[in-house]
Image: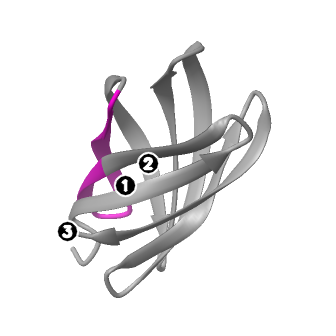
Amino acid sequence: MPFDGTYHVTVKTPMGSLEGDLTIRSSGNSFSGSMQTPFGASNFSGGRINGNQLKWQAETKTPMGSFDVTYSATVDGDKINGEATTPLGAAPMEGAQV
């Protein structure tokens, strides 16, 4: 699938930018993967694909603890852009495939 691979992403949270590597493994209209940040790795499953749009939920580790975060993103070529909805509000996300 064209989404499979690793993307280096930056999530611009109210507490500052968080960089990480998002790895996606798709199967049909669903996907699983992981997010590796300086605070640790978080695995997820149950992601949904609709055209070039991705949606998934993951527990994300931060200096303030772990939070459930809902992600929505659009993939355009090797770029990924979207939003992470956190307990502190929405945070823009952008990145590129590595």
Which is closer to the viewer, label 1 or label 3?
3
The residue shown at (60%, 34%) is: 69
Residue 87: image quadrant is: top right
Residue ID for mark 1? 30
- What's the CA distance linking mark 2 and mark 3? 20 Å
Q: What type is the residue that disc 3 sits on? A: Val
In the image, is 34 to the left or to the right of 73?
left
In the image, is 27 to the left or to the right of 17?
left
Q: Which of marks 1 and 2 is nearer the N terminus?
A: 1
The residue shown at (55%, 50%) is: 11
Residue ID for mark 3? 98
Disc sitting over residue 47 in the figure: 2
Above or below, 27 relative to 77: above
Queried whether the magenta region covers residue 70, the answer comes back as: no
Residue 72: image quadrant is: bottom right
- Tag 1 near tag 2, CB within 8 Å: yes
Q: How many C-alpha atoms fall within 10 Å of the one at disc 2: few (<14), some, or many (≥20)?
A: many
Q: Earlier in the sequence, mark 2 or mark 3?
A: 2
Q: Earlier in the sequence, mark 1 or mark 3?
A: 1
Q: How many C-alpha atoms fall within 10 Å of the one at disc 1: few (<14), some, or many (≥20)?
A: some
Q: Looking at this rendering, what residue extends furthest in the bottom direction?
A: 77
Magenta span: chief secondary structure? strand
**Element type at mark 1:** strand
Q: Where is residue 23 in the image (x, y as percent from the top left)?
A: 25, 51
